[in-house]
Image: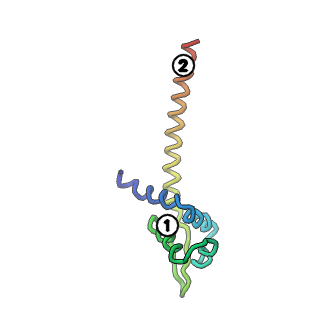
Amino acid sequence: MPKQSAPLIRVFQALADPTRLAVVERLRDGPVATTELAAPFKMALPSFLQHLDVLRACGLITSSKRGRVRTYELSPEPLKAAEDWMATQRTLWQRRLDQLDNFLNELKEQSE
């Protein structure tokens, strides 16, 4: 595995979990305090905090603390890297499928 792809792999691994994906979707609307962010999830707070640690470790979220309240915020840079990778893959596969389509059309024309 190339060293530069490791951060991208961690982003996809983090987003593969439904709880973490829901957290990222919730943070699209802006920063949220920990207790408010954890409220919709049916799990103990320490378990939920482990999900936040995974998201923070791969750079998808950041946190800040004011007094006793910790707030989490979405960090879009890793999502942009994932989007760029997917766009590159889409372009590659579209080109390959176009080449296959052309090849199959040529075979069809030759057999007629």
Furthest residue to the bottom?
Answer: 67
Residue 37 found in image quarter: bottom right
Task: Name the amino acid type tagged 1.
Answer: Leu
**Residue at image coords 51%, 73%:** 47
Q: Position of residue 5 (x, y in %)?
A: 40, 53
Name the residue carrying label 2.
Answer: 106
**Residue at image coords 57%, 21%:** 105
Is residue 3 found left or right of 71 in the rendered image? Answer: left
Q: Earlier in the sequence, mark 2 or mark 1?
A: 1
Relative vertical location of residue 64 with respect to residue 1 in this rendering, above or below: below
Is residue 42 found left or right of 4 in the rendered image? Answer: right
Measured Cα–Cα span from mark 2 to mark 1: 49 Å
Name the residue carrying label 1.
Answer: 55
Q: Position of residue 92 (x, y in %)?
A: 49, 39
Within 10 Å of disc 2 (Cα), the crowding (few <14, some 14-19, many 20+) is: few
Colour pattern of the rendering: rainbow
